[in-house]
Amino acid sequence: MDDCLFCGIVARKVPATIVHETERTVAFRDINPVAPVHVLVVPRAHVTNAATVGPEHAEDLAEMVVAARQVAEAEGIGTEARGYRLVFNVGRDSANSVPHLHLHVIGGRQMSWPPG
Ligand code: AMP
């Protein structure tokens, strides 16, 4: 999608620190991290958000979750002793700001629940 920020990162037209890639996904560091590890995993194909995901996106979704685990392992937080949070934001109440599906991989510090 021409005017999509994360499509631009996938196409290497917008700079980002890419840390992991698979056939269907790209993972890069969040520009405004909320924790020592904050990586976004996106599908290469444009999908607006989790509310627009359908059965046709099953392979993208599965690969995103696997990629998130691989990122967590590479960052040293994919252990039972550590751990991490996976987040999809949808809509205004969640503060979703970029309309290209992305899975936040957040970790490296103790988090609380519920989120703010
Ligand atoms: P969300 O609120 O779920 O839409 O999250 C969007 C995330 O994208 C935020 O955490 C932003 O900090 C992050 N972000 C925005 N622009 C960029 C960028 N150019 N490179 C990396 N991360 C970005």
Image (cartoon, rainbow, N blue to C red):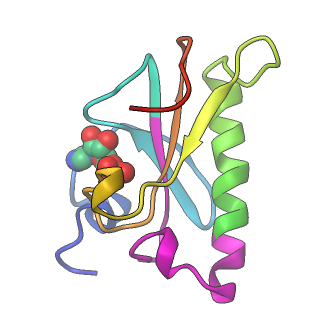
Q: Nearer the viewer, residue 34 or 30?
A: 34
* Vertical arrangement, residue 113 with respect to residue 94, above or below: above
* Vertical arrangement, residue 108 with respect to residue 89, above or below: above
Q: Which residues are magenta?
A: 39-60
Return the x and y of residue 77 as percentages of the image width and height. Answer: 67, 20
* Vertical arrangement, residue 73 with respect to residue 26, above or below: above
Taking the magenta stretch, the answer to whether it contains residue 58 is yes
Q: Nearer the viewer, residue 45 or 21?
A: 45
Residue at 26% of width from left, 31% of height from top? 32
Seen in the image, is 65 located left or right of residue 35? right
Residue at 56% of width from left, 11% of height from top? 110
Seen in the image, is 36 located left or right of residue 78? left
Return the x and y of residue 3 as percentages of the image width and height. Answer: 17, 75
Residue at 56% of width from left, 60% of height from top? 25
* Quarter of the picture holding the C terminus: top left
Q: Is residue 16 visible?
A: no
- Answer with the quarter of the image where residue 8 lies: bottom left
Q: Is residue 106 visible?
A: yes
Return the x and y of residue 90 as percentages of the image width and height. Answer: 41, 62
- Answer with the quarter of the image where residue 83 lies: top right
Seen in the image, is 23 located left or right of residue 62? left
- Answer with the quarter of the image where residue 85 lies: top right
